[in-house]
Image (tube, helix red, strand yellow):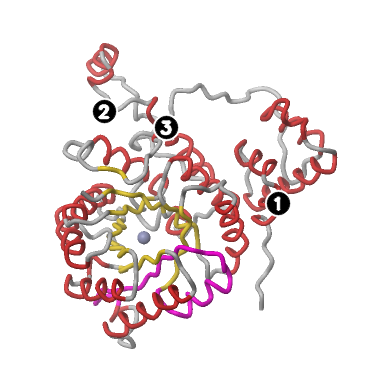
Amino acid sequence: MGKIYIIDVTNRDGVQTAKLGLSKLEKTMINLYLNEMGVFQSEFGFPTTHHEKYYLAANLELSRTGVLQPIRLEGWMRAIAEDVETCFKQVPDIKHLNLSISTSDQMITGKFLGKKGKRDIVNMMVEAVDAARAHGAETVGVNAEDGSRTSLDFLLEFGLAAREHGADRLRYCDTLGYDSPFTIYETAKALAENVGLPIEIHCHGDLGMAVANSVAGAKGVIDGGQDAYINTTVNGIGERAGNADLVAVLLALTKAKGIGGQYQLGCEMDLSKSWRIARFASYAFGVPIPINQPGVGANAFAHASGIHADGVLKDPENYELYSFEELGRGEPEFVETGREICTGRYGGISGFRHVMGEIMGEEALRFHDAEEAERVLELVRYANVLAQKPLVEDELLFIAKYPDIAQKLLTMTPLDY
Ligand SMILES: [Zn+2]
């Protein structure tokens, strides 16, 4: 029986969201948290976008040196050979790619405006796959954008052509959140059976069904005899109504009636990191976690009504499907209500030493010399300027631990023109 893997796309689809964004250090932190959680792959960015260049290279370096292991880092681009060429010019060490092109009649007529037909779409995609292979890409996923408004016949033709040219996976994108669990199950099963490749399921929440569709789609893929890959984002942040939420998908896969215990995850996942990654993403994006968010919302384990409170006190399982401890909740969190020393863009060395001392204890005194402490502080200043908000402890620790990598992340050399 096939297994289910998670590919998180926060650092691609999430940051594409209107009015939101992440600094390069914040994107790196997301990759680190995803790795700690056991996520199979992070779609870590845009290799054809100039300002991503140093960030992508620095994260690949973290991968090479074992810091970002075993997670795979994969870059997203359009499925055209020109983008693949630009990608390998900008980020020569990249190993995993996803190549995306629209496949629906709506997009072919409404976006390509009659300049491209279905044949052209398939040709552009296979040329891009060939180019990726020629450059030594280790894995290539091919994305059918707007797949849910594409005829099954054309999806099969597209998927089979991708497979013939050596693609490793087909991503079925419900780009507009148009599917229901019933339709996506059937389509995903048919794709798995007839294309003969593992299938990725990429869902959006325009009709409120992103998580349900992801799980139903994955079930279809497995029943069709292939491994399934679900695309998620942290807190469901994504374009318009968002993507399938990472924690909710994991809860559904492990706890839902008829799903939990029936299907196997391809990677061992550590749900107890849920609270930390959800909180960080909320802070970094500047978007509060909804009070009723599964697992990580403020009310996910709150009980007020007499009957429920009485019931949960007698036995939590009366009114809770899973425990807060499983998600890494329950530790007290302190808020400073008195004097507070901060560090940041205009900070000096003594404030910085104080802050690092609070976080690291004795370790903070282990900066080799004043010069090293000064260098880390300088990096912290730059990171603060780029993020436009105070850095969290994990970010400060990361910079102190990997100053060379941090320096690369903070490098924004304007264009190679
Ligand atoms: Zn999307």
Circle nearer the viewer, 1 or 2: 1
Residue 86 in magenta stretch: yes
> Which residue reaches farthest bottom?
115
Q: Residue at x 28, y 51 (%)?
A: 210
The answer to which quarter of the image holds residue 256 is top left
Q: Earlier in the sequence, mark 2 or mark 3?
A: 3
**Image quadrant where one finds the C terminus:** bottom right
Q: Which residue is mark 2?
A: 321
**How many numbered dots are placed on residues in this image?**
3
Q: Secondary structure at mark 2?
A: loop
Q: Nearer the viewer, residue 370 or 180?
A: 370
Q: Label 2, label 3: how many angstroms apart (C-alpha)?
A: 15 Å
Identify which amino acid the numbered label 2 is placed on: Leu
Residue 209, how many percent across, how many down? 25, 50
Q: Secondary structure at mark 3?
A: helix
* Tag of residue 272: 3
Q: Earlier in the sequence, mark 1 or mark 2?
A: 2
Residue 406, how many percent across, how many down? 67, 50
Q: Residue at x 62, y 45 (%)?
A: 389
Estimate how packed mark 3 is, as few (under 14), some (14 to 19) or many (20 or more) residues with alpha carbons within 10 Å.
some
Label 2 beta carbon within 8 A of ligand 1: no
Q: Secondary structure at mark 1?
A: helix
Point out the stretch of residues depicted in magenta: 79-107
Q: Which residue is mark 1?
A: 404
